[in-house]
Amino acid sequence: MVSTVLRRVSARAEPLLPIADDELILGWRNSEWTGIAPFLEEDVAFSSIAQNEIGHARAIYQLVAEELGTTADELAFDRKPEDYRCSPFVELRLVPDWAKTIARHCLYEDADQRRIQELIEADDPEVAGLAAKIDREEVYHRMHAQMWFERLEDEPQFQEALEELRPLVDQRGEHLPEFEHLWQEMTEVRRSVAGATW
Amino acid sequence: MDSRVHVEFTPSFLGCPALEVMRDQMASRIRELGAEPEVEVVLDDSWSTDRITPEGREKLRESGFAPPAPREAGGSQLVQLQSKAFKCPYCGSTETRLENIFGPTPCRSLRYCASCRQPFEQFKTI
């Protein structure tokens, strides 16, 4: 039998689901730059970051799915829009605004680092182990954000974007209207063919 | 006789798109050898690129991939990637520069060798 299992089972769905949902939705938003980023290097970078974030979401969903008696795909694609716990901050559709995209990237990576660090220090070794793994990968996202921050920090347009987005970082609650469209697109395959796999 | 074979493996990056392919290939190879495979994907930080053997690193280099640098205490920093401490897998020169933190797969960066004027892929440290 082939199975994807984690080493130990924990019951930590409550704090983990919002993180997984953020990573899934931000991964989706980042992937919207694929093919249209201002530089070829950034096309590759944002596609790669998107892939990583969605990989983190999948790993967290897997961890949570076991104790909820479901699967990662069901959590990612079969929930109703109101059941997703992501922040409106990651739901914002920012294409084609590069300054805002980089501003969100910098703010998100900073906030994400803090909550991943809390998980690394968690008592649950399974959660801590996965968080440490995620953090190893996020290092490269932070380097990328830092590189762009240094490049744009003197640009008024970038500073305005930071000011505009900063208050949204820790906001939770109502989804933005544009989340509905994302959800429609993201869940289309599974709504058309129940249980479809990739 | 117990003919089950248990394999634990850790992806370099969790979002690796080759994960399922590698898992299925391991399983089918084990089946070909007459055993029942149990392939477990480990999702923690217990594996590091530091565990790639010298032989494995040499195979990477021969294939044109620069092997990963060792893990640093305190984690990798941008300034290190931007330094010239990385050797070109083709000519061995350290006159190399970072072109892009991200490459064709999540586990690799792109660098350029100013000595032999060859772009190359550098494995990320995990």
Image: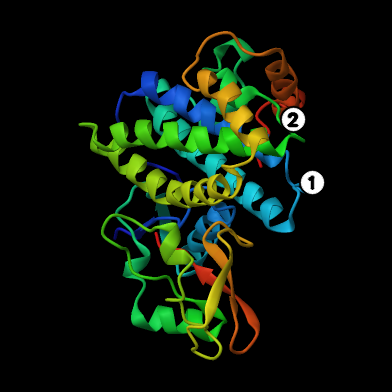
Numbered circle sitting on residue A189:
2
Residue located at (48% from left, 40% from top): A56
Q: Is B19 in front, or is B104?
A: B104
Residue A152 in percent (x, y) is at 61, 44
Residue located at (31% from left, 33% from top): A119
Residue located at (49% from left, 66% from top): B82
The residue carrying pointer 2 sits among few (fewer than 14), some (14 to 19) or many (20 or more) residues within 10 Å by Cα, namely: some
Residue A104 in percent (x, y) is at 58, 32
Same-chain check, marks 2 and 1: yes
Looking at the image, residue A15 sits to the left or right of residue A189; the answer is left
Residue B117 lies in what quarter of the image?
bottom right
Q: Is A17 in front, or is B28?
A: A17
- Looking at the rendered structure, the kind of residue marked 2 is Val
| Residue B98 seen from this side | yes
Q: Is residue B46 above or below residue A195?
A: below
Q: Is A114 in front, or is A73?
A: A114
2 vs 1, front mark? 1
- Looking at the rendered structure, the kind of residue marked 1 is Ile
Q: Which residue is mark 1?
A: A36
Residue located at (48% from left, 38% from top): A109
Q: Is A186 in front, or is B76?
A: B76
Residue A63 in percent (x, y) is at 40, 33
